[in-house]
Amino acid sequence: MVKISEFQVKDVVNVGDGKKLGNISDIEIDLITGKIEAVVISSGGRVLGFFGKDDDVVIPWKNIIKIGEDVILVRHKGAVEKLKEEGE
């Protein structure tokens, strides 16, 4: 078993481009099944949850590839799509 507090200190890395997305700030749970549906990655830059950017990224549980001791590897296409749009 893994505690939420242990999740929050791990870096979340996108396997598509190798970039660090941030750290898990929250989770979404299906109240009927009790299963984790997604994790929410905080972008940082916010003070006490009020000020700054609100660029949280939601990663569906099915897109988590591997949970290691220090890192959580995820598949997140948003970063790749953003790079393609900037190149156009």
Image (tube, rainbow, N blue to C red):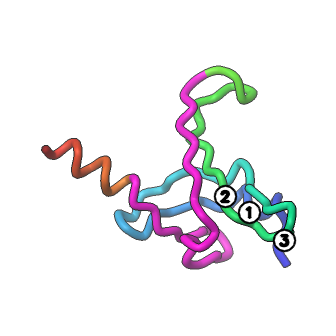
Residue drawn at (55%, 48%) of the image: 57
* First-in-chain label (3 vs 1): 1
Q: Do the residues labelled 1 and 2 touch (CB within 8 Å)?
A: yes
Q: Disc 3 vs disc 2: which is toward the camera?
A: 3
Whether 54 is drawn above or below 24: the answer is: above
How many marks the image carries: the answer is 3
For badge 1, the amino acid type reads: Phe
Residue under label 3, please give it: 33
At mark 2, the secondary structure is strand
Residue drawn at (69%, 25%) of the image: 47
**Residues in magenta, as a range:** 52-78
Residue under label 1, please give it: 7
Q: Is residue 74 magenta?
A: yes
Can you say which quadrant of the picture contains the C terminus?
Answer: top left
Can you say which quadrant of the picture contains the N terminus?
Answer: bottom right
- In the rendered image, residue 56, in percent from the top left (x then y), is placed at 58, 42
Question: Left of 4 or right of it: where is 12?
Answer: left
- In the rendered image, residue 2, in percent from the top left (x then y), is placed at 82, 73
Q: Disc 1 vs disc 2: which is toward the camera?
A: 2
The circle on residue 24 is none
Q: Disc 3 vs disc 1: which is toward the camera?
A: 3
The circle on residue 39 is 2
